[in-house]
Image (tube, grey):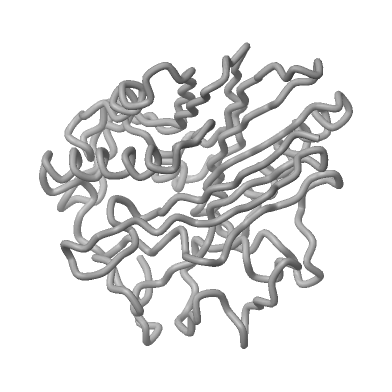
């Protein structure tokens, strides 16, 4: 469920892809968009391995094949034998996860489980987690490259608070060890409103000139004082040149569909971010650009280890 440009509630009708060819087109387009950036590291979320919604195409294998000699880590974060919802287009079987690719050798990797709801909403949410991939650095330290996907549908935000606390435990351990940490992810939190790097707020100066009602799944990562819930020693890095996420209940209409920036990075203080930007995908065949292959567009950073 979402809202149109006048704040009226909208609701889509499909839970799965209409055609197999559509899945292949979107998968190939998303992967090629990332390849075009010539990255050293990549964090993908919601990568299907065997799901009804994507005609059982193994997107993780397609990513591995496309990135050749890159090291690969896959952490499952959505598994259901059969989800009978919605009744007119059932979601069915889902097997999906977080895929991380690294040009540098991954010494070890771990899946870190997030707390998820125990109520009925659990059946519609993911088995949330983040993964950590350890890469040795020439100076004897370690780089922890992490891939995260936090909850979206969490009334009252209680589950998200627990997930932040769990991530903070990990961040504290890595800070005490003096490691480098870079986390890329879909945070399902607006990363621009109240961000001290910008002047956006939730009333008179909102990102991307949004005037419509904010969907229930969007929370704010920064409070009114410009602070995040994460421990000291880490910084949220987000870009505002393009949005990274759109409401996906109905077909995308530029200027009408709600958009925001929920994709970005958390980096430790010993990581210097030299540039960052969101990448607008191209959809010229529909007469406009943006969200060509997904309800998300990529976020990118360049960084140095101090």
Tag count: 0
Q: Is residue 90 left or right of residue 277?
A: left
In percent of width and height, residue 33 lies at 35, 45
Q: Residue at x 81, y 35 (%)?
A: 306
In percent of width and height, residue 74 lies at 46, 23
Residue situated in front as seen by the camera: 36 or 52: 36
- As drawn, 95 above or below 105: below
Residue situated in front as seen by the camera: 47 or 136: 136
Residue situated in front as seen by the camera: 137 or 25: 137
Q: Residue at x 44, y 59 (%)?
A: 245
Q: Is residue 136 left or right of residue 30?
A: right
Q: Residue at x 58, y 23 (%)?
A: 111
Q: Residue at x 39, y 45 (%)?
A: 124
Q: Residue furthest right?
A: 176
In percent of width and height, residue 221 lies at 67, 59
Q: Is residue 17 left or right of residue 64?
A: left
In percent of width and height, residue 168 lies at 76, 39
Q: Residue furthest top?
A: 107
- As drawn, 43 above or below 121: above
Q: Quadrant of the N terminus?
A: bottom left
Query: Which quadrant of the view contains residue 118?
Result: top right
């Amino acid at each position: 469920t979402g809202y149109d440009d006048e704040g009226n509630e909208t609701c889509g009708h499909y839970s799965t892809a209409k055609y197999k060819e559509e899945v292949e087109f979107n998968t190939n387009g998303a992967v090629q968009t990332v390849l075009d950036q010539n990255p050293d590291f990549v964090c993908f979320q919601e990568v299907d391995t065997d799901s009804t919604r994507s005609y059982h195409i193994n997107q993780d294998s397609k990513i591995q094949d496309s990135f050749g000699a890159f090291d690969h880590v896959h952490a499952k974060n959505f598994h259901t034998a059969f989800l009978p919802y919605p009744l007119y287009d059932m979601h069915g079987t889902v097997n999906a996860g977080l895929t991380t690719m690294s040009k540098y050798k991954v010494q070890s990797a771990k899946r870190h489980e997030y707390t998820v709801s125990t109520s009925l909403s659990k059946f519609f949410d993911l088995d949330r987690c983040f993964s950590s991939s350890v890469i040795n650095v020439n100076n004897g330290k370690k780089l922890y490259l992490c891939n995260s996907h936090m909850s979206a549908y969490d009334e009252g935000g209680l589950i998200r608070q627990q997930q932040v606390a769990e991530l903070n435990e990990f961040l504290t351990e890595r800070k005490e060890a003096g490691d480098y940490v870079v986390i890329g992810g879909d945070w399902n939190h607006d990363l621009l409103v109240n961000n001290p790097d910008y002047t956006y707020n939730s009333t008179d100066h909102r990102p991307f000139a949004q005037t419509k009602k904010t969907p229930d799944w969007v929370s704010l990562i920064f409070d009114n004082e410009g602070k995040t819930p994460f421990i000291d020693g880490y910084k949220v890095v987000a870009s505002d040149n393009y949005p990274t996420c759109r409401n996906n209940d109905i077909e995308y209409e530029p200027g009408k569909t709600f958009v925001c920036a929920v994709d970005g990075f958390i980096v430790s203080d010993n990581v210097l971010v030299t540039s960052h930007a969101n990448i607008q995908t191209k959809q010229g065949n529909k007469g406009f650009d943006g969200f060509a292959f997904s309800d998300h567009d990529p976020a990118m950073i360049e960084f140095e280890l101090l």
